[in-house]
Amino acid sequence: MINKKIYLIAGIGIAVISAVFFMLTNPTLLVYGVQRAGIYAAIALPMALVLGIVHIVNLAHGEMMMVAAYLSYFISRTFDLDPLLAAIPTGIIMFFLGIFIFKTTIYHTLKAPELNQLILTFGVAMVLSQTINLMATSQPRKISLDYVSASASIGEVSFGIYDFIFPALAIIFLIILMYFLKKTRIGKAATAVGQNPRGALIVGINVDLTYTVIFAVASALIGIFGSVFITKFSIFPAVGGAYTMKSFALVAMAGIGNLPKIITASLILGIAESFVMSIPGGAGWTPMIFFGLIIFVILSRSFRSKH
Amino acid sequence: MSRKLSAISFILLFMLSFGSIFATGQTEGEVKPIKFGGVWPLGDITGAQASKAAQLAVDELNANGGLLGRPVELIVIDSEFSPEKGAAAIERLATVDKVDFFVGGMSSGVHLGQIPALKKYKKVTMWTGAASHLAEEAVGANQDWYFHLHPWDYNQGASYVEGWNDIAEKYSEISIDRWFLAYEEGPFGSASFEATKTLFADMEIDGEAFQSAAAGGGDYTAVLQRAKEYDPDVFIWAGYAADALPMMEQAKAINFVPRLFVGAPPGWPSDFGESKLAEDVTLYGMWAPAINTVSVKSTLFSVGYETKYNEIPATYFAPLGYTSIDIIVQAVKAAGTIETDAVIAALKANPYESALGEVINFKPSNVISNQGICQQKILQWQNGEQEVIWPFDFATSNPAYPFKGWTK
């Protein structure tokens, strides 16, 4: 117990000293690090819900985000709507699309080994990206928006401030999910189903409904994220794949089922990446930093549990 | 018994000959079409527009009585940017569809996969894409049947050097002494950086890699910040279409305003010009709708394309696709036959005024015998349109300098 407290205090101390050091030497490094962390956390949280709480392995996570981004793009273009407003209809559509995908595919593999889910959702990912490729072509699309270039200055250094929308979105997602899981009947049921589906069934929980609602809620959050995503990034059919991998890695790093730790893990990765990118020639090292840190954390955790 | 056998043999023979007529879709008296086989990546705007433009050339021809009194047919197969699928498409076009000519092409990687099949059949081939000199080496010398329209990478590099030097000489206020290249970390970007350093060896050059959105990246702030500190005369980014608008938005966010902002992706997003951030951005290309003001052939092509498809030919692959068909058609007309040697001789002998503006005269390049276009153009977005600023023969506008970007 005392050891734990010492580690916690030491961790917070190192974080504060590092933050002050970065703010003094290169203030934008911390700014960009937090912004990157926000992107990672916001996309990883819906996966943390389905993987961590009800143990569904969804390899189509990034592709669902890509579909949501395209939906938002076409809604914005058709109705001359800002993508941030298009997040509402996109979230609703994705909620129902989530139900459809779950009921037609994943539902049938819930009792099968996880490898089946893995292969099945990989197939879903391929179908989604190829469908979008056929319908919208591989041509990248981006909505040009003035407000995404909003900037502020520290001394003589200008930096973009719009990207703070991602950390804000991640915090909102976390608050909603924590409230949903702790305070609502279906949220509490989801935790029980995740821990022991048979036990949950015996005590009268509607397990099928719980799985469906959790997957649909995660899909709706992915929908909202997709709408915010197109304000900053170009979209094309293959854009989602990288985010599936990063979300998986973050969920693994944070620990399965631990939603708040997604934020901490994202901050560590975001700031580490930002730091590496600030070094000349560092861009090529960022993917290695991302996955290297994850390997380190998972290995150290397994060593700790052994001893 | 022998009667029975004879009867069965007769029926079988009759069925076979009857079936073969239907199998080829041919009935007695019907004229066999002259066939073009095209391979492009149809999911990409370059391939989609090139194949549409090629179909336009075929339709125009058929509307005017065909070629040598025969109808013309274009069969297009999607390469899907895959060397395997691109090679299989050539095999299918040669053996199943039995085409007379090959056209098409976009992507050097795909073309490298197709070259062995093309060399096997040695049909007259008019290629619209593939800039890598590796593809040229794979084709090899003395392949008379192979015609390449697109400039090779070294042609492009030489064009840029010539173009920028010409521009700096003509417009004394334009300085090109200090360069910064932001390049995507993959083979395309790294090769661009190395080539730029070699080509502009007498100038100050620095560069930094970034992770392209196409490879899961999309955050350019670090590289833009470094470029801003370097304060270059010319800032070039070599990435992909997905990087184009986010690159501009992030440059604006950090208030990075180089004197010349140049983008060098293989293709641009179709809606890039609609953005206010596109203004004054310089780019490389072979054609822009603005060339219509200086070339009648280009205008005819543009009007035909827009009337048929109700869209603007946004990429230079559209006029290249049209040219690939039309140039063979003119050679066949001149030769009076589709016989390979006669068509090759006609292609070599007759200059061809293309929809790209240039008059194409095939001549040997470093390796191959028949290279069509050797020069790139330097273009600039001005008032939502791509204007040609070099070569001066095709110039439709003066360069906007310095890049004002978001400071306006």
Image (tube, coloured by chain):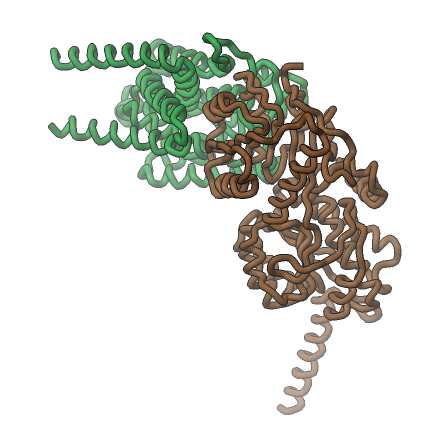
Residue closest to the eye, B282 or B202:
B202
Q: The green chain is which one?
A: A
Residue situated furthest bottom in the rendering = B2
Q: In this view, does A141 lie above or below A173?
A: below
The residue lying toward the viewer, choosing from A77 and A279, is A279
The reply, left or right, for residue B112 in relation to residue A294 is: right
Q: Identify the image quadrant of the N terminus of chain B.
A: bottom right
Camera-side residue of A173 and B227:
B227
Q: In this view, does B313 lie to the left or right of A224?
A: right
- Give how far across and how far down residue A57 sits, in percent: 36, 32
| Percent position of residue B258, x then y | 59, 23
State the hue of chain B: brown
* Quarter of the rendering containing residue A205: top left
Q: Is residue B17 above or below residue B108?
A: below
Instruction: Name the quadrant containing residue B352.
Output: bottom right
Residue A205 visible from this viewpoint: no
| Residue appearing at x 83%, y 54% in the figure | B61
Counting from the top left corner in percent of width and height, residue A33 is at 39, 19
Q: In this view, does B169 lie above or below B350?
A: above
Tell me if I can see residue A120 in this picture: yes
**Towards the viewer: B255 or B171:** B171
- In what quadrant of the picture does the C terminus of chain B appear? top right
Kindly identify the residue that appears in the image at 64 percent across and 91 percent down: B2
Q: Is residue B340 left or right of residue B131?
A: right
